[in-house]
Image: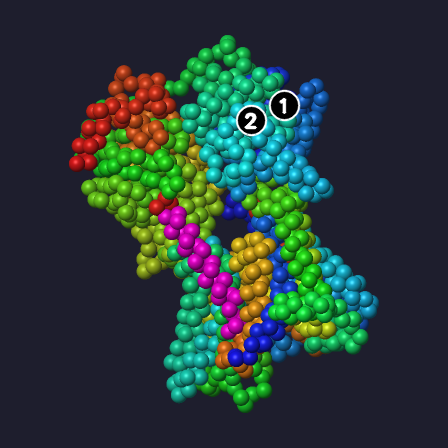
Amino acid sequence: MDRKRIAGLLSSTTGLALTVGIAFVIVIILIFVLSKEPGRAIYYFFVGPFTKSYYFGNMLNQSIGLIFTGLGIAVAFRSSTFNLGGEGQAYAGAMAATVICLSLPSLTGIVGGTAAILGAIATGAFLAGLSGFFRMRWGTDQLISSFLISAAVILIVNYLVTGPLDDPTNSMLTTARIGQQYQFLRIFKPSKLDISIVFAVAAAIATYFFMQRSHWGYEMRMCGINREFSRYAGINVAKYLMVPMAISGGFHGLAGAVAVMGTHYRCLKGVTAGLGWNGIAVALIAKNNPVAVIPAALFFAYLDAGARAAMLHADVTFELAKIAQAVIFFLVTAQALYGFFTTRKRVAA
Amino acid sequence: MSNTSFPIPMLHSTIRIMAPFLLAAIGGLFTELAGMLNIALEGLMLIGAFFSVIFAAATGSLFLGIALGIVASVLAAYIFGFISLHLRANIFITGLATNVFAEGLTMVLAFQIFGNKGVIRFANLPRLPVLSNPSLQRIPVLGDILVGHNILVYVSWLMVVLASIVIYKTAFGLRVRGTGSNPGAVEATGLSPRRYRMYAILISGFTCGLAGAILSLQLGAYVPGVTAGRGWIALVAIYLGNKTPLGILIACIVFGFAESLSNYAQGVIDVPADFILAFPYIITVVAMIAYSMIRHYRLRGSER
Amino acid sequence: MEGITKFFAASGVLANDAVDLVVEEGEIHAVIGENGAGKSTLMKLLYGLEHADAGEITFRGEKVAIKDPFVANRLGIGMVHQHFKLVSDFTVAENVVLGSEPRARGPFIDRRSAVRDVSKVIEEHGFSVDAKRKVQDLTVGQMQQVEIVKMLYRNAELLILDEPTSVLTEQEIESLFNTLKNLLGRGKTIILITHKLEEVMQMSDRVTVMRDGKVVAVRDTKDVDKRELSRLMVGRDILLEVDRKPPTYGDPVLELKDVTIRCRGQGRPLLDRISFQVRSGELVGIAGVGGNGLAEIEDVIGGLRRATSGRIFLHGEDVTALGPEPLREVGLAYVPADRLRRGASLPTTVRENCIVTKHHDFLRTGILQKRGIRAFTERLIEHFSIDAVEGMPAGNLSGGNIQKMILARELAAETDFILFSEPTWGLDIASSQFVYEKMLELRQRGAGVLLISSNLDEILGLADTVLIMYRGRIVGRLENTESLSKEIIGEYMLGLRDDSQSPSAVASAEGSRG
């Protein structure tokens, strides 16, 4: 490795450390201001997730969805396509998986489950692919169209959950429970951690190799870095305005399916809320590197788990995690903190 | 539907409902003209909603409540602007951050102060004064629709006028628009584009704070997540309104009407409320696609 | 300006190295130099857009610190940038007053007096723009007038014009020069940045020559001639050392028939019925001044832009409608003019740059074969003696090595037709020489080579057939014989000669169409 690269890596690592450090400092300050027992709250916030296997398992479980959505965003960003509709795609995926499971009550788990997962992926891919298609065809702004489609989809899924698919026997706003055979194996009881974490990790590694070594991955990356160059060299750049979006949407749909089949066993109202937005943060922390998405997702899940533990054992509330996440969100793209972006821009005239 | 008086209260509530949209969108218009996609409107509104009702209840003064709500929101906008402009972060991501931050902060504070995260009612909260002028109200139709709202509704209309003047008649407006169209041109005259961007962000903080104040003071309570996507719809209104104050006004009337319709339609006609709420998003995406199609086919033949 | 030094840490470029520049009041002072000599940077320092690392600026006897254009304006320094700094959806008046708007009351702009004041400046100097029109509706020449009005409105005494003629038509240039003489008559001082010697001789009183960030000479214009200036600019008498053997032509590999590109809303087509062919073993050079259709020819042959009408044949196949990907399959190799954006992807590794046009060859069941790619890249690096490591980002390479890398990649395709566009622009002599040798090698091998270049030495030194473009048309087709000189080509390039208008040329064009 040459010097420049190491320097770049270093400054990006220190930037990230600084970002996380600032987030923690703000959380600690907030706890001191708000809590009557700050020591206890801080202890549980930072150490809590590791004190009980239940917390720990749930933290890992929480990271599964974030790995999938983080991967979806990383693939899209790497290709310079913008998927802002993750929330809707994940929610629609959850709904698609639920509907398929509910309408195929007598199939075996493998067959019906595969159908449900594929259906969820296809749903997410279709929704995101639409935005890709509009941009490819007419140059419609992808950022905004994907958000708008997602916002509309969320409301429509809400309608399905609370209207025609509502389970009248349950007081919660939710669909009926999916069949036993479709529920993923729990591997770390009493926590909700299920077998799909294995798939998530495998998916991250597979995505890494897909992006680095596969035909499509290479062309997508080239388009992402320099579209003019790619077009000149004969890569079908139009195609790669849509393909990465569809892949991204597929990952989000998958995250939705896993939330239903692995954790909740039903499509609750807002079952995937936050997965889309946080997926963006996870991908940014990971610098769009698919393998780095795993620790980034774990870190986000850790913040959540810490706040939950602190809420149960002390007098602060769970939303403390949101503030920490917001601080990271704020700073993760701040070029002033990541020296190595800044030297790029200026070119001698 | 034969009842002829039916549309009047619906139009009346349209006017009430659209006020927060209008205010947030007008603030967002400044940032948009300065060349920034401001998705923080939602979060800024939420902060305004929370702090205005808290301070109004604490001080017993409506004015102080609104003022401090706005201060909080402008402060948040400053943080948002500082990180985006001075630390050179991606404004889109920091906008998301602002929304997450607002959500977290209001929840945490509500919990710490009131011990719960649900709806917080305030017994002796001062009510927003309502403009009721019997002689004006006697004007047929218009009187029924336009009179009898709280004063902030009228403030929101005033803001539209004010914004038009500032944008089109003042040096400041010219500079903000120049910043958005070609920051290089502004820089070449010795002005700092970054400064005008910051001003625009602070203006959006101001109007969003006011928009939030309307939401919660109308209810007389703080409802978690009271903004419910209104900031996003305001953003949509800017695009649909073709980035002009008048266009935004029309877009907001449409959205206000849609929401009002959904309130009234429940039980009357068989369209689920969620579908009607989805309407602004769908209509905007269709409009966007149509717009880009037209542009695409106009450019064709020259560029490939 | 004295001892001005500017170093761009990011790119490692010492743009200005202890530069002294003295401009006397009431003169037109030309600053000349090749691309990248540091002229523009020096002017940006004077205008406050960049800040010097060392040195000082004295203006009218006083030491000044110009921290931003605002200060420059106040001192009476104005600048017209090469790329106009105008807000296209504003009116002329709005653009001119931006930043120093006349006020009615408080913050309100006094529109009427803005239009009136601006119109007054326009009239006084005999410009032809309407203060109330939107800038986007103006011609390029008019936009430049707006820029000049902008300076005059601010009472600039020292006017800097950065390459003002590069985008103008002949008539516009003439009217600009009249304007400048007029301004001089009113006691203004003008700095004219250019790399065109004609303009220096015609317009300036004195001239400062820059090369590689340094001032190499300051002369009174009347004491120098073009030859001396050009020698000073490039540091040597230009002379290409290439050994061009007599050509042997084969069948046509590329043929264009009446290729036209029209832009909506523009009267003159960008390309107007372009017809020519390149035979195997032939090196065809297309010369012209920028903006006369060279870039469009590059794009249309490269498949990046579609012809409005006309046909293109490559190896006998009709490729008119094909994009870059199928074109490369038919047999196109192409070294683009914009090598930093189009020709290479700077953040990407050398390896990934090298395989971009033929990565399909390294696929096995959809997976890129790392070992094969490495070996291939290392082979290219060796054969073309590129100073690089296969895993390093292309952006770390020098300009010459980036061009070698592109060359290596394009030549590796071993096609019988290769397009070169401005292949030595901004390269040092050794790298240019390398590129020339490769081009001649290809021609010798029997490939058809098309060279698009605004560098006449290159065209004269290499081409067998010379085509000259002017305003979208081919105005001259010449065999490159001993009698052909730069002066003759130059006359075609500037529109002074035009064979396409003569009856015989029209007849032959008609004939080829029939």
Q: Is residue A61 above or below residue C450?
A: below
Task: Give the residue at x 49% y 31%.
Answer: C142
Report the span colored magenta: B275-300
Residue A55 picture location, percent across and down: 63, 76
Task: Give the residue at x 25% y 23%.
Answer: C502
Q: How many marks?
A: 2
Nearer the observer, C200 or C12: C200
Residue C47 picture location, percent across and down: 62, 30
Is residue C230 shown left or right of residue C253?
A: right
Residue C359 picture location, percent across and down: 34, 50
Magenta span includes B219: no
Residue designated by label 2: C123
Tag 2: amino acid: Glu
Is residue B279 shown left or right of residue A238?
A: right
Which dot, 1 or 2, sits closer to the camera? Answer: 2
Q: Earlier in the sequence, mark 1 or mark 2?
A: 2
Nearer the observer, B284 or C483: B284
Residue designated by label 1: C157
